[in-house]
Structure formats: C-alpha cells, structure tokens
Amino acid sequence: MKREQAVRIQKHVLDADAALDRARTAIADLGKKERLALDGLLQEAVETLHLELLEEIYAQYPDLEPTPMEEEVPAISSTLTWDQVRLPPSVTEADLDSIILSSLKPQWQKTAMVVFRAMDRCEERGLPIGDEAIAARLQVLAASDRIEGIGDLRKWRHSEVRLKD
C-alpha cells in the first residue's frame, strides 16, 4: 500500500475508533446482561482495530504511529483478586464497602478515579488499605450486582463504574 492510502485508511480507522467509543457510552445505559454481552463484543472490535489493523499500517509506516502520549493502549492496572486481599483486623468488608460506595456517583466515572478517591478516604481515616485492594473489592461489588461496571475493571483507566439506579 502507498503512504497516501495508509494515511487515508488510518484516518477512517481512527474515526471508527471514535464511533466505537460513542457506542460504549450508549451501551453503558443498557441493562447489565445486555451491557456485559455487548461491551465484550465492542472490546474485541476495538482490540482488532488497534492490535491488528493499525499495527499493520504502523509496521509499513512507523512514522504514522502516534506517540504514547497521543494513544494509550488499555493495560491491566492490577491482577489482585479479592480472595488474595487480607484486610487489617480493624477493617471489615462492610467498612471498605461503605468507603467505596461513598466514592461512587450515579454517573459513570473512571474506575481509576473511584479507586483513588476511596484510597484518599482510607488515608483520611488512617486505614492502611491500598489501591489494588480497593480495585479488587470494586470488582466484587460489580460482580455481585451491588454497583454497575463497564469494561474490564482491572483496566482502571479504561473502565467505568457507578452506583446502581
């Protein structure tokens, strides 16, 4: 493919990526079952665009690839699971849930924002609870349908959570 063709294809793919991001916002307002099913399919499409189609273009024309500041590839922030977390004896799951729930809003927020807001509240109360433990608990709350989440909650900057309606 010629460079002009690569530039034109890249522009269309990036436009499609922006459209898929708008689709994710629309999917976020669906019921949990539909949201989970469609968000997984949408994530596959996004990964195909980035990891296959764009990578092919960038392999031929490396100068077209955005700098890391321009495009961030979704990455897992933490693999810690709740069963691996050990809370201090003075802190119960209910205590942590209360802190997390007080950090949530009815509107979608990035998981990272909620994690760090909850971590600040833990620090204010002198509770030695880290960000990864909070994120692991967020996953449990979403899986048990106590809050709503969209995207892979292990990818804090690329997933969102909110209070249930």
Image (cartoon, rainbow, N blue to C red):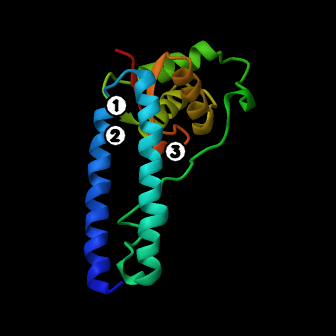
Snapshot quadrant of residue 117: top left
Q: Are marks 2 and 1 in contact (CB under 8 Å)?
A: yes
Residue 120 image position (x, y, % from top left): 48, 33
Callout 2: helix, strand or loop? helix
Quadrant of the drawing holding the C terminus: top left
First in sequence: mark 2 or mark 3? 2
Query: Looking at the picture, does residue 136 appear above or below residue 11?
Result: above
Whether residue 157 is visible to the viewer of this picture, yes or no, is no
In the picture, the disc for residue 28 is: 1
Furthest toward the bottom, the residue is 2
Name the spot of residue 7 as percent of width and height, x first: 28, 77
Q: Nearer the viewer, residue 23 or 95?
A: 23
Residue lying at 64% horizontally and 31% vertically, measured from the top left: 128
Q: Are marks 1 and 3 in contact (CB under 8 Å)?
A: no
118 above or below 44?
above
Q: Which disc, if any, is residue 155?
A: 3
Residue at which label 2 appears: 24
Task: Residue at 43%, 37% (x, y): give it.
Answer: 39
Give SS at disc 3. Answer: loop
Residue 99 at least partly seen = yes
107 lies left or right of 160: left
Residue 52 percent location from the top left of the image: 48, 65
Q: Amino acid at mark 2?
A: Arg
Foreground mark, 1 or 3, reads 1
